[in-house]
């Protein structure tokens, strides 16, 4: 079955979720991946959105983090202070899914500004929940489109801490959680190396070359000794994902009540 | 006890130039009708607090109401940028705007601290990131018991909190259902409060003893504003106008188009008295 690189990325990210995960979900690619996991191999996964919805099972993907669909299909909905204090800070979340405008080799993320903070070239939306999601969830999965503007040697601003500017700051700060353990792009899957926490390419998506990765990465990217090819999406995974997107598009078009 | 007022009268009495105000509602129940009334009454030099500025603060910033913005996520949810917010920060249009930027956790804790009557909030956060270096209101303290480094931010204590809710009874008790966000905390943290509601009823018909209810005596004024959260939504009444959120991207990108839209849909529109 034919598929595009975004579908490959979404499927690869979804596969990383386990049935017993308690997952803090961001909007966009993470939301698609998490719901794909729930509708395929991980029906028991618990999805939590920062708007306060716990164990939500949306039939269509939300456009915003607080769409009514999330509340209507949730086990329960708590206030936003409770969400951040008891559930996130309290250590109840096993996986947080994040994206950003820029990522560096140690999984630090920028979603605040491009250029200097006081006189930004591009003012991005900002942290939202990401700063404390990055430090409080058991582990972090990052999903991002792979290009040289996004995969940079040095971030313009650290919005969310990965393993730190040298890969070691997270431990030095006494943070107990694991941090970014997976980086899924439209070209490859990357994992941090055990010694220095630098993200290295673990598998190339079918048809992608090492040269393509080098051209799209702003640092001297390294490849795992046992570099593999990512298993391509199955017909079943693609069917569920496309149905989800089709339902979502139809629902958002007729959302005017 | 809350007093029932026309929306325009309530805004005229409660919101003054130079005030610090918080219009809350986490994607859900955003008080657009009240915000539009503030724009029509041309309030100036406001400090606007809101976790997610959303289209409403984009409109208020673009219309020149804001001197300062205190926020944690300034995007159009699921769509992209807030262009009026960006134009103010990047190009000082229509005038320069000061920003105080936080994370969601910090903002939520700051509201909860305000509601609890505390001067500041403590939480575990902001470790190893750059926001503390650009926001002097983010500081760190050592836990007196464990020595752990904790983040500390001032409590939010707005002059006025404004929220939209499903319904009020005739005594002015207010019910909020669905994604309840930080609305309860915002009202309890504020010196004055205005609640707009979809309807005023004889009986709130509470389905649970744990429903989120704001008693009349913590609210300053209530105004009837059916549809007052559109294009945001009111759980049980109408759904989020996602297509308008998408359409706003084009409207807000261009200054002239934005001004024309605001004139036609907000400034020249006389509110229908309830």
Image (cartoon, coloured by chain):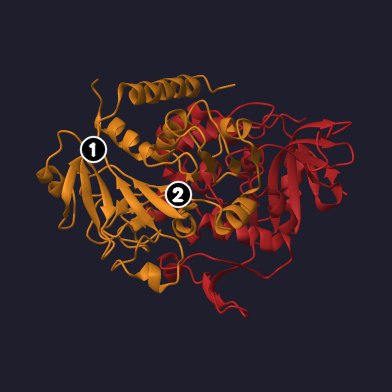
Chain colours: A orange, B red
Is residue B229 depicted above or below B91 in this figure? Answer: above
Location of mark 1 (residue): A230
Residue shown at 45%/49% (left/top)?
A: A96
Q: Residue furthest left?
A: A211
Q: Chain of mark 1?
A: A
Q: Can you identify the residue that label 2 sits on?
A: A96
Q: CA distance from mark 1 to mark 2?
A: 22 Å
Q: In x, y percent, where is residue B236?
A: 69, 28
**Residue A145 occupies which quadrant of the picture?**
top left
Measured as percent of width and height from the top left, residue B195 is found at 74, 43
Tell me how many marks there are.
Answer: 2
The answer to whether residue A205 of the structure is visible from this angle is yes
Looking at the image, residue B218 lies above or below residue A229: below
Q: Nearer the viewer, residue A92 or B250?
A: A92
Residue at image position (19%, 51%) is: A217
Q: Is residue B239 above or below residue B96?
A: above
Q: Residues within 10 Å of mark 1 (few under 14, many from 20)?
A: some
Expressed as whole percent of the image width and height from the top left, the position of residue A21 reads 49, 44
Q: Quadrant of residue B35?
A: top right
**Disc with the residue nearer the chain's start (1 vs 2):** 2
The reply to whether dot 1 and dot 2 touch (C-beta < 8 Å) is no
Q: In the rendering, at what x and y percent does residue B72 appear? A: 51, 54
Quarter of the image containing the C terminus of chain A? Answer: top right
Asked whether, in this view, residue A58 is left or right of residue A200, the answer is right
């Amino acid at each position: 079955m034919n598929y595009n690189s975004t579908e490959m990325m979404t499927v690869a990210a979804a596969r990383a979720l386990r049935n017993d995960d308690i997952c803090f979900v961001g909007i966009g690619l993470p939301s698609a991946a998490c719901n794909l996991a729930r509708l395929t191999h991980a029906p028991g996964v618990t999805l939590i959105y920062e708007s306060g919805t716990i164990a939500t099972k949306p039939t269509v993907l939300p456009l915003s983090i607080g769409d009514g669909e999330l509340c209507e299909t949730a086990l329960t909905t708590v206030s936003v202070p409770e969400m951040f204090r008891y559930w996130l800070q309290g250590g109840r979340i096993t996986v947080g899914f994040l994206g950003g405008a820029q990522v560096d080799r140690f999984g630090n993320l920028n979603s605040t500004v491009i250029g200097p903070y006081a006189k930004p070239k591009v003012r991005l939306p900002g942290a939202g929940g990401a700063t404390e999601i990055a430090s409080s969830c058991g582990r972090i999965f990052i999903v991002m489109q792979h290009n040289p503007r996004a995969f940079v040697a040095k971030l313009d601003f650290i919005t969310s801490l990965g393993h730190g500017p040298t890969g070691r700051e997270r431990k030095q700060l006494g943070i107990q959680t694991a941090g970014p353990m997976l980086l899924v792009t439209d070209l490859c899957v990357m994992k941090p190396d055990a010694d220095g926490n630098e993200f290295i390419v673990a598998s190339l998506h079918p048809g992608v070359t090492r040269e393509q990765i080098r051209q799209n990465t702003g640092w001297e990217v390294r490849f795992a000794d046992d570099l593999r090819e990512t298993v391509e999406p199955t017909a079943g995974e693609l069917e569920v994902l496309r149905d989800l997107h089709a339902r979502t598009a139809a629902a958002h078009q007729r959302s005017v009540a | 006890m809350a007093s029932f007022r026309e929306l325009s009268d309530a805004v005229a009495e409660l919101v003054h130039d130079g005030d610090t105000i918080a219009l809350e509602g986490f994607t859900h129940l955003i008080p657009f009708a009240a915000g539009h009334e503030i724009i029509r009454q041309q309030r100036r030099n406001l400090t606007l607090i809101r976790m997610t500025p959303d289209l409403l603060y984009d409109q208020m910033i673009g219309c020149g109401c804001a001197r300062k913005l205190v926020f944690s996520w300034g995007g159009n949810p699921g769509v992209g940028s807030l262009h009026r917010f960006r134009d103010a920060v990047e190009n000082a249009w229509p005038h320069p705007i000061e920003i105080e930027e936080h994370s969601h956790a910090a903002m939520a804790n700051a509201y909860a601290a305000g509601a609890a009557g505390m001067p500041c909030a403590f939480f575990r956060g902001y470790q190893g990131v750059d926001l503390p270096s650009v926001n002097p209101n983010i500081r760190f303290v050592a836990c007196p018991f464990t020595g752990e480094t904790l983040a500390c931010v001032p409590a939010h204590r707005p002059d006025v909190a404004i929220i939209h809710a499903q319904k009020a009874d005739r005594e002015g008790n207010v019910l909020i259902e669905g994604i309840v966000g930080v609305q309860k905390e915002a009202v309890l943290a504020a010196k004055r409060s205005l609640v707009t509601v979809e309807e005023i009823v004889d009986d709130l018909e509470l389905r649970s003893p744990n429903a989120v209810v704001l008693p009349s005596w913590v609210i300053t004024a209530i105004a009837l504003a059916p549809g007052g959260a559109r294009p945001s939504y009111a759980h049980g009444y109408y759904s989020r106008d996602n297509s308008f959120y998408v359409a706003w991207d084009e409207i807000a990108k261009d200054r002239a188009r934005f001004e024309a839209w605001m004139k036609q849909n907000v400034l020249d529109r006389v509110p229908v008295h309830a």
